[in-house]
Amino acid sequence: MKSIFHPRKKISLYLDQRLSPEEVQKLEEHLSVCKSCRRLLQNMSTMRAVLREKPSVSVRKDFVSRVIAGHRRQQADEAFWIGFESVPRLLPQLAFVLVVVLALLWSWPQLEITTPEAVDDQIARVSVLDEREMISNLTTYDEALRFALNGTYENMEGDRK
Amino acid sequence: MEYYKDEYYDLIKASQRGDVKAAGKLVEAHAQAVHDFLFHLCGNRHLTEDLAQDTFLRALTALKHYQFRAPLRAWLFRIAINLYRDQRRRKIVRNIVSSYHDNEQEAENIVSNTSVQTPHAELERKERFAHLYKAMQKLPESLRTVIIMRDLQELSYEEITQVLHWRLGTVKSRLFRARKELAELLSDFWEEK
């Protein structure tokens, strides 16, 4: 038995009048003998009619004023940011300045030594270190004993003289 | 390059120059179409209102870039679809839809807002639309979008290609699939009548 070709895709185009006159004629001939295609056309057509009854969602009465108010707010926000448009172009310079500032902050403890108090503190620390070095250089028992009795390096030096 | 003379050309031009009154008139002229479009797309009244407002806010901000390549209505639908997809991506829609409403009841509410007919005809129309609405929600998003654009909003095939960035062949085949699937979903109901 020979199978019949059903040009179903054309039914949709037929509804929208997107077929050539020849195609329309052929399709209508087919529809006159094909019950299933006729039913599809009928259902598609009914469905479209129902959709085109345009049941609609009610729009709130204040919808337009709300949108316009929102739009004005957006415009105000945009106007605020206009002054900052050049920020991206200045980024390299800003980065350089930031690096310089960070370098200065990092070196601050070393600079602190230049204050008078810091200098005194440093001298005191150095003299303590010198004394300890001298003790470690004492080589004889006598020297060590005399240092222990006299208490200071200066006295011992004086004895030596 | 401008090559589409929109019926709201003057209002659009005025709005592009910053005329807020003209912008208000544009919103007023398209509010209903955008609401209908979004409602049939997402099926939720509250979400429709939020998305419609966002659509117009985004449109007014971007209006200076509108180049008359498609009707303003189609351009608004494009924005609405993008916003709807963003929402879906954030899974907000899924949460709201799953907990919010009964589709059939929603459909009846909408129909009750439309013109008054004889009680019997009105009842029949409500019933017909409720079935259609439920069936529409079963379609994949792409098919639902194309059928809303063509059969509800009556955009031409060419306008749909511009809005959805599909080729003409894709529009034709998806529209056919959408109608065929809807017809199959509704055939039992309509053939009883």
Image (tube, coloured by chain):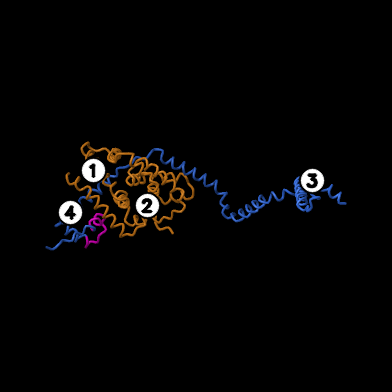
Chain colours: A blue, B orange
Estimate how packed mark 1 is, as few (under 14), some (14 to 19) or many (20 or more) residues with alpha carbons within 10 Å: some
Foreground label between 3 and 4? 3
Quadrant in which the C terminus of chain B is drawn: top left
Estimate how packed mark 3 is, as few (under 14), some (14 to 19) or many (20 or more) residues with alpha carbons within 10 Å: few
> Tag count in the figure?
4
Q: Relative to residue A19, is residue A110 drawn left or right? A: right
Foreground label between 3 and 2? 3
Q: Farthest residue to the top: give it.
A: B119
Are discs 1 and 4 less than 8 Å apart at CB? no
Foreground label between 3 and 1? 3
Q: Chain of mark 3?
A: A
In the image, the segment drawn in magenta is: A10-23
| Residue linked to disc 3 | A148
Q: Farthest residue to the front: give it.
A: A141
Q: CA distance from mark 3 to mark 2?
A: 103 Å
| Residue linked to disc 4 | A38
Q: Secondary structure at mark 4?
A: helix
Residue drawn 69% across the image and 49% down it: A109
Q: Secondary structure at mark 1?
A: helix
| Residue linked to disc 1 | B128
x, y percentage for residue A138? 78, 52
| Residue linked to disc 2 | B74
Q: Farthest residue to the right: give it.
A: A161
Foreground label between 1 and 2? 1
